[in-house]
Image (tube, grey):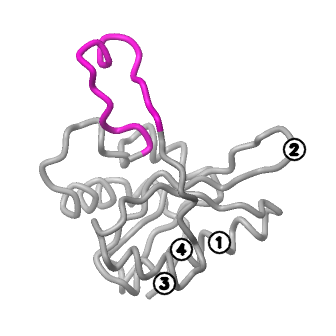
Amino acid sequence: MHYRFFEESDYDELRALERRLFPDRPDPFYRATLPALRFYTRSGHSFAADAGGRLVGFVLAQAVWQGDRATVLATRVAAESAEAYHGLLRALIKSAYDANAYEVALLSAPGERPELDRALEENALTASGQRLFVRILGERGAGGDHRGVLS
């Protein structure tokens, strides 16, 4: 399996892969939208898992400057296999290290994807014990919707 930066020619396949891996979710859940993919293509921290010309996973991540240091924040890690999860996380960690961003963060619901849970552990990513509090403003949030924020 090869882990590489994705390109514009991959966008349709990435979008279809995310929808296949996470079926029947509300639209705000999905991260592999055209505007997001265009952004993440330039981030230097987003990768696709390529198995012989077929994409089997991806990670969407960016460096976030916090005033005194950078954290590489992954907003989506999606894959068909434990091998792909493991390789994507290794690529993400290496890209962070190479960019002198010595913090890597991502949100994950424990137990939802056991293959991801194992890959997180194998790559020494640990739960922080904190919770994410969200509020959606504007029309979408008027009904109390909180889905899709960093999920």
Instruction: Give the mark nearer the N terminus: 1 vs 2.
Output: 2
Q: Is residue 138 rendered magenta in the image?
A: yes
Mark 3 or 4, nearer chain start: 3
The kind of secondary structure element at disc 4 is helix
The answer to which of marks 1 and 3 sits earlier in the sequence is 3
| In this picture, residue 68 sits left or right of residue 81 | right
In the picture of the structure, the residue carrying the numbered disc 2 is: 68
Q: Which residue is mark 1?
A: 93
Q: Nearer the viewer, mark 1 or mark 2?
A: 2
Amino acid identity at mark 4: Leu
Q: CA distance from mark 1 to mark 2?
A: 20 Å
The image shows residue 53 at horizontal and vertical percentages of 35, 79
| Separation of marks 3 and 4 at Cα, in angstroms | 13 Å
Q: Amino acid at mark 1?
A: Ile
Quarter placement of the N terminus? bottom left
Whether residue 96 is situated above or below residue 89 in the rendered picture: above
Span highlighted in magenta in the image: 133-150
The residue tagged 4 is 89
Residues at circles 3 and 4 in contact by the CB criterion of under 8 Å: no
Mark 4 burial class by Cα count in 10 Å: few <14, some 14-19, many 20+? many
Main SS of residues in magenta: loop
Mark 3 or mark 4, whichever is nearer to me:
4
The disc label shown at residue 2, or none:
3
Q: CB of mark 1 within 8 Å of CB of mark 2?
A: no
